[in-house]
Amino acid sequence: MRRIVLWFLATLATVVLLFGYRTSTSSTMPSTVAVAAPAAAAAPSTGTPSAGTPAAGTTTVTGTTASTRWGPVQVQLTVAGKKITAVDVVQYPNGNGRDQEINSYAIPTLVQETLSAQSANIDMVSGATVTSDGYLTSLQSALDKAGIA
Amino acid sequence: MGMPVSLALRGRHADDTAAWEQVLAELRHVDAVFSTYRPESVISRLGRGEITEDECPPEVHEVLALARRAERASGGAFSAWRDGALDPSGVVKGWAVERAAAPLSALADTDFCLSAGGDMVCRGLEQPWRIGIEDPHDHTRVLATLDVRVGAVATSGTSRRGQHIADARTGRPPTAVASVTVVAGRLTWADIDATAAYAQGADAAAWLGHRVGRTGLVVWADGSTTTVGGTAP
């Protein structure tokens, strides 16, 4: 696996300045395993316009409720002029078992014991301290160092 | 404030630095357009009323439309307009990193995981990427792991932007929740939903549970956790 790390000075959401750039390579991965497709959201029904909330040329149109295998789904379109500017799902399936089916990919598994990132063969760390000053002491930093040392 | 960008590649094009350069070029471009810290950026000029929305490039329209959707979907807890000032940065980051990952998607037989400041886009067709979720109360610990094949993971919490995230309806930062991690098909929405859920404090897990196609983990201020999407009724 190859790991590239770049430290940016960010103006907040994104980036500006190159701080350091180190790369290295190690092994590649074995093959096998099929692709798990992410769960698909339910398809909306054909909508009949039922509501209009005018706000400077903007209209919202709520579709009729569609029955899906997971439960009822209803979609709302926001139209400005002739352009659809937003599609919101206003009604969701509320049977929990069905929710689970829709959401059943990549569910976090709680780790009971204290675990460092390296000992768990973790590739990346998601967390709030990976940004800003926290990076240097973060697990992600440790992983990056391990990968590029 | 600094934001590290980490990229892991494996497979046929694991040594392709051209794709990495494209990733960086896209991030720089987005920064030039959207930085509220740069007075000459498009978003700063729009905020000062020097240009109209119609005069902005298409990506600004896209981001503002996202911001409006996020505000509606979160019942106003999430807003790109703070005290009348335009600040869509809560929407831009995930969206930008997702866009920046496009050149990596074009690499055949190559898996990638692109992380920017703890939020990431993953493709692990050969083998899933194993993502650790940081414990917001002890940054040396991993609280949970998840295996992601194709999808995105984003985490919002107190330490990311100081006390920057507030419930736009009250102007106050949430106190009941320590961090929210969201897994979704696209990073744009994983990031928005993590921030929007976090801003809602005690309602974070309940709100996230109604978002179609999301799973996640809410860590509460008292250290307890709620897994969203993975628990039986």
Image: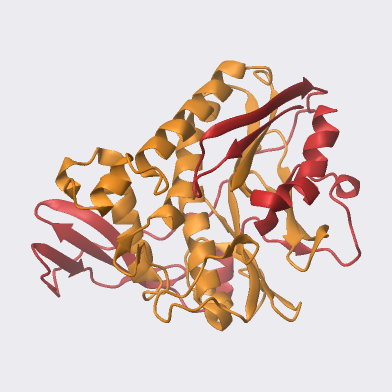
Chain colours: A red, B orange
Q: Is residue A8 left or right of residue A26?
A: left
The C terminus of chain B lies in which quarter of the figure?
bottom right
Q: What residue is shown at x 52% (from left), y 56% (from top)? A: B190
Can the viewer see residue A126 in this picture? Answer: no
Asked if B170 appears above or below B65 in the picture, the reply is below
The image quarter in which residue B55 lies:
top left
Residue B132 is situated, as x and y percent measured from the top left of the image, at 75, 53
Q: Position of residue B178 (x, y in %)?
A: 66, 72
Residue drawn where x is 35% and y is 39% of the image: B33
Residue depicted at 14% across the width and 57% down the height:
A80
* Residue B199 against residue B182 in the figure, above or below: below
Q: Which quadrant of the figure has residue B171? A: bottom left
Q: Which x, y percent locates residue B127?
A: 73, 37
Task: Locate residue A110 relative to residue A128 in the image: left or right.
Answer: right
Percent of width and height locating residue B189: 47, 55
The image shows residue B39, relative to residue A134, as above or below, that is above
Q: Quadrant of residue A141?
A: top right
Q: Residue furthest front?
A: B39
Please indicate, yes or no, whether residue A18 appears anywhere in the rendered image.
Answer: yes
